Image (cartoon, helix red, strand yellow):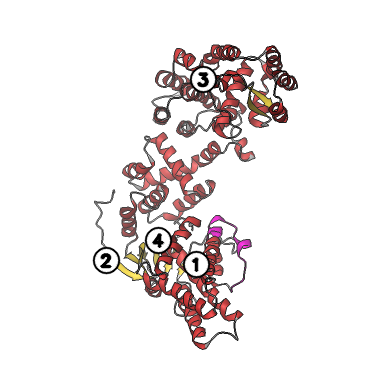
Amino acid sequence: MNHESKKLDTPIPVTQKMEELFKNNDFIVPNYQRNYAWQNGEISDFWDDLSDIFNGYRDGHFFGQIVTYRNENHVQEIIDGQQRLTTSIIFQSVLRDIANEIRRNNVDKIAEDTQKKLIRIDSNSEEIICGEDGEANTLLVQKTSEDSRKDLRIFFQNLTKHKYGNDFSCDASSIPMKNMYNAYRQLKKSVEEELQKFSSIAERVDKLKKISDAFIKRFYVIMLSTESKRDAFIIFETLNSRGRDLAASDIIKNHIMYIVSDNIEPINKKWQYISAVLKDNSSRLTRFIKTYWAARNRLVPEAKLYKSLSGKITKKTDAFDFVNDLDELVSLYDMLENPTANKKNREFFQDKELMRLITILNKLGVKLYYPIMLAMSKKQYSESTMKQVLNMVLRVFVRHRTIIYEGTNTLEKGYANVAAKIYSEELVGSIEINNYMRETLYKNNKDVENAHLVLSKDLKTTGHKKWTLVYLLQEYYDYWKDSNGKLYQMTFVDDNYVPCHIKEENIDNDLINYVGNYTLIEKKLVNKLDKANTDLKRAQVMRESRLEINKQLAESLERGWSNEKIEERQAKMTAVTTKIW
């Protein structure tokens, strides 16, 4: 915490049942809060907790803490707890709609006492959703657009006030809308399945009332309401500083909003843009902030990210600089994670060789170098310089991880250290950066060659392991002048070639997955090769390939492929490994 020097007017916690909570308060979700994010897992947990109550396994359930700021209009601005409160309103609309459906579909079959129970369920739910006057909503979520068709607040109001039977899935144009609609649908399905266990209408209504009572009378929260927005932010940070149930990015956002509490709107607009670029994914946003912090300051684990960052960002100027940097770098980060996702990402840099390197690193599953790219971008390095540095980044990775197969901890720390030195301008230009990486991270030629002599890779048809084999073979073949340098396009871009064993039968198990026993083959030839059960038949398929290497391998197969030939080919690859990388 960084607010010990500020006097905090500590509010008195108030324990309230859910029916009291909404009858006594009106709530609003400020626009700077994250949008509704509960999905199937959280909704299932909610239903399981509720089931324990109405099935008699427990007497009550603590639904969590609510932290609010009571604004000048006497409305509670939610600082913490909006996911639970939003779900509560959605659940009440489910109960109301089911009660109304039962009444409409069974007008002449319902006894008077059963009719009264349904009316009571309906009125209880309506009072929680709309208050005693039945007009204004007790909970207003974020207003996200002036266009009513895209506004989350309007969607939520329509969803929770609609007549049963309306399908709102077609109106859900954003992820938060889809989450709200999914919560409604999942909760409705759960209630209906529970009611279907009973045959008579009276029994179903009794069960529906038990479900309703379980929530409004036996779910409770602890609410802390302050008269100061500053105090509410401090309480939120204190309660959540270890990231419990929240992504680190949510805690960090609150910290930033606290610092600029009297000038939130410009910061919030940029934060919303940053989040939107990353598809409103809190985990991606956390990874982005962690990557940026590694470049600007130092590498810290996610669990310590908030503590490290909040200790450095303590003034308004710090907060604005931090968010401005994220705003400037988020598109680059998104591209690094998804370089081939769309035309904009594929053409992010004009230098095609730079994009080639980024695509290769992405296919190999390499993310550790992201801080270096952010630091170089922040320092306005040219694409040519970036390309030279990424060449070294890739060579370091292949030597360290792909060939020698050492762990990633050293590389993660090493790359982050390089990034921090770029950011602080301790290292300037590609020559200094690459020399530093060569001195601190580069594996020596002898160790690489010894490891490569026995280099073995599992055969996979998808994922990083597939692309590792594709990359290694493509680099060997290009070095040997096969395909006139077009193999990258045919493999990484067109994805027309896949790795395959040259031969598996009558080969020692230890040698089958040696890289010397692999080649690349056109996808259209894979099935024919799989069916070829003799060296001669495999050779015939190899001759159909466009690659000169495969035609040479066909000759070797005709003469008989063996353990010795695999080892000989592996040694040939080893001889050029340190020249390529």
| Image spot of residue 202 (x, y percent) | 51, 81
| Image spot of residue 332 (x, y percent) | 53, 38
User: Mark 1 highlights which residue?
Assistant: 90
Neighbour tally class for label 4: few under 14, some 14-19, many 20 plus, Cα within 10 Å? some
Helix, strand or loop status at disc 2: loop
- Real-space Cα distance between discs 1 and 4? 15 Å
Q: Nearer the viewer, mark 1 or mark 4?
A: 1
> Along the line of sight, which residue is nearer the eye, 484 or 424?
484
User: Mark 4 highlights which residue?
Assistant: 81
Task: State yes or no: discs 1 and 4 in contact (Cβ < 8 Å).
Answer: no
> Along the line of sight, which residue is nearer the eye, 390 or 539?
539
| Image spot of residue 52 (x, y percent) | 40, 65
Helix, strand or loop status at disc 3: loop
- Residue 518 position by quadrant: top right
Instruction: Write down the region rendered in magenta.
Output: 163-179
User: Mark 3 highlights which residue?
Assistant: 455
Neighbour tally class for label 1: few under 14, some 14-19, many 20 plus, Cα within 10 Å? many
Residue 49 can be seen, yes or no:
yes
Q: In the image, what residue type sits under mark 3?
A: Leu
- Real-space Cα distance between discs 1 and 2? 29 Å
Residue 119 marker:
none
Helix, strand or loop status at disc 4: loop
Q: In the image, what residue type sits under mark 4?
A: Gly
- Real-space Cα distance between discs 4 and 2? 17 Å
Q: Residue at 32% across / 55% down in the picture?
A: 239
Sequence-wise, the earlier of marks 1 and 4 is 4
- Real-space Cα distance between discs 3 and 2? 65 Å
